[in-house]
Amino acid sequence: MATKLLLAFAICRLILTVGLTLKPKELLHLGFDGQLSVDPADVDYASKDFGLLTRVEPLAVFHPSSSLDVARLVKAAYWSDQGFTVSARGHGHSINGQAQTPNGVVVQMSGNGIGPRPRVRAGDMYVDLWGGELWIDVLRSTLEYGLAPKSWTDYLHLSVGGTLSNAGISGQAFNHGPQISNVHELDVVTGKGELVTCSEEQNSELFHAVLGGLGQFGIITRARISLEPAPQRMRWIRVLYSNFSAFTRDQEYLISLNGSQKFDYVEGFVIVDEGLINNWRSSFFSPRNPVKISSLGSNNGGVLYCLEVTKNYYESTAASVDQEVEVLLKKLNFIPASVFTTDLPYVDFLDRVHKSELKLRSKGLWEVPHPWLNLFVPKSKIDDFNRGVFKGILGNKRTSGPILIYPMNKNKWDERSSAVMPDEEVFYLVAFLRSALDNGEESQSLEYLSNQNLQILRFCDDDGIKVKQYLPHYATQEEWREHLGSKWDRFHKMKAKYDPRHILASGQQIFTPTFLTSSNTASW
Ligand code: FAD
């Protein structure tokens, strides 16, 4: 009874605000099993994201219990005379309000007890997942069968639907492609409220559009993900470079290797300053290390580059892992005596960033603004980027967050997906994962870091470095058109077909909901 009353209240609020023409009774008859909530705590939670740069209040938050629930809600939005927006929210780890929506309904896809549990089909090497499932829970479920997905993100407390709407990348992407290259099938609720199963063979147009589609064409309620036998342990190795060209040459060499004689994970990062906030992602340079990192960078304006690789193994292959690592390292040109090795269970490696999260949280350094900038930089311009950005704009200043840099092979990405990458066979992810701190240091302030991001983008523009933003953020359709390039026409066509009223994921600011009058659109 209490649930019904709350639901009726939420519906009345929707009606009052957006002029929904459905009668409350009719919405009640839609028979949601989930819960439509206007609880201020729920609304507040859905108004924020990891970036803490924007705050946008929805009218209500919907906690669905099934795909059908999601479909009923979107259908109600689609058929209502005046319309209202609906945004799926996974774990809200976006930076710029991508999962938020003003005066609409946020569908909270992730959370305890929401959606069905993962179903592993060990014989067929796949798992069926609820769209709001967090990758850490996916890993736990598949490990019960000795299996695991092949392609990851560095941090696992992100939702399946959230990363598949972008790409989902980490150090395995050079080998297995991004997470969107490892999906067999999806269930999607389109912007018309239709629940559609899609794959390479069935409704393939929708399948490809949704992968990397920034939530524009449908809400992913189920994803079928490819699995492999889970490694048991891994050697995790880091080596340092002061010479950028040697560093990138070695990274590119490692991602060009085929067959089994290669590393399983290749990443890297720029070291300007080793401190908790500056490098929270990576803290295993232990005091037992034979060299002092700061002394190595002294000839290079304080800038060092760290290559990070892993070799997976099973207890049955443990005897040969050292030799395999040695053979591979012998081909590289890092600073001698800068090899840092550790060995740990597979799960501990994959969940490594969560440990850093807990450390930062305990110091009040996690829930701070994050003006992150992620760029895909074409290989041919990575030297120019180093000169202009790492050594130029950033110089020898404190970075207030990790700066990742690693290459990927474009042939592992499916051109038919909506994801956008540069026009070269090899491109780098360069990720400025910086935190803004209100500690009186100008170079760590939100304003300073945001301006520096603009400076980096301007430098690339002026220097003809054709970067593409990953987890893109733009305010005008003109910029989106430019970002999507040759994919724009299809993107636009797919939007008209699958979400004609522009109900979904309006927080991406690509399409204005068609039911908003011009006076309402000013804030979009
Ligand atoms: P949300 O922020 O909740 O949503 C993101 C977008 O996806 C929104 O537009 C939303 O409407 C849409 N969406 C959410 N769920 C669905 C769904 N079920 N169906 C359709 N659309 C949906 N990314 C990487 O690729 N690699 C990394 O290593 C990596 N590391 C990260 C580490 C941290 C600490 C953080 C904060 C982010 C990281 N990211 C990384 C970025 C992350 O992948 C994206 O921000 C992703 O969107 C987060 O997932 P989420 O569930 O929090 O999405």
Image (cartoon, helix red, strand yellow):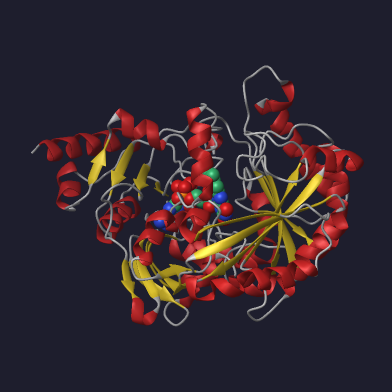
- Please state which of residues 381 and 58 is positioned toward the viewer in this rendering: 381
Residue 249 occupies quadrant: bottom right
- In which quadrant is the C terminus drawn? top right
Q: Residue 171 at what x, y percent from top left? A: 62, 61
- Please state which of residues 218 and 472 is positioned toward the viewer in this rendering: 472
Q: Is residue 366 left or right of residue 135?
A: right
- In which quadrant is the N terminus drawn? top left
Q: Residue 177 at what x, y percent from top left? A: 60, 69
Q: Is residue 419 left or right of residue 380?
A: left
- Please state which of residues 273 and 80 is positioned toward the viewer in this rendering: 273
Residue under the point 19% across and 39% down: 7
Residue under the point 53% across and 33% down: 360
Residue 82 seen in the current view: no
Q: Is residue 261 left or right of residue 181?
A: right
- Please state which of residues 141 and 209 is positioned toward the viewer in this rendering: 141
The image shows a total of numbered marks equal to 0
The residue most toward the right is: 299
Q: Residue 107 at what x, y percent from top left? A: 35, 47
Above or below residue 187? Residue 28 is: above
Residue 486 occupies quadrant: bottom right
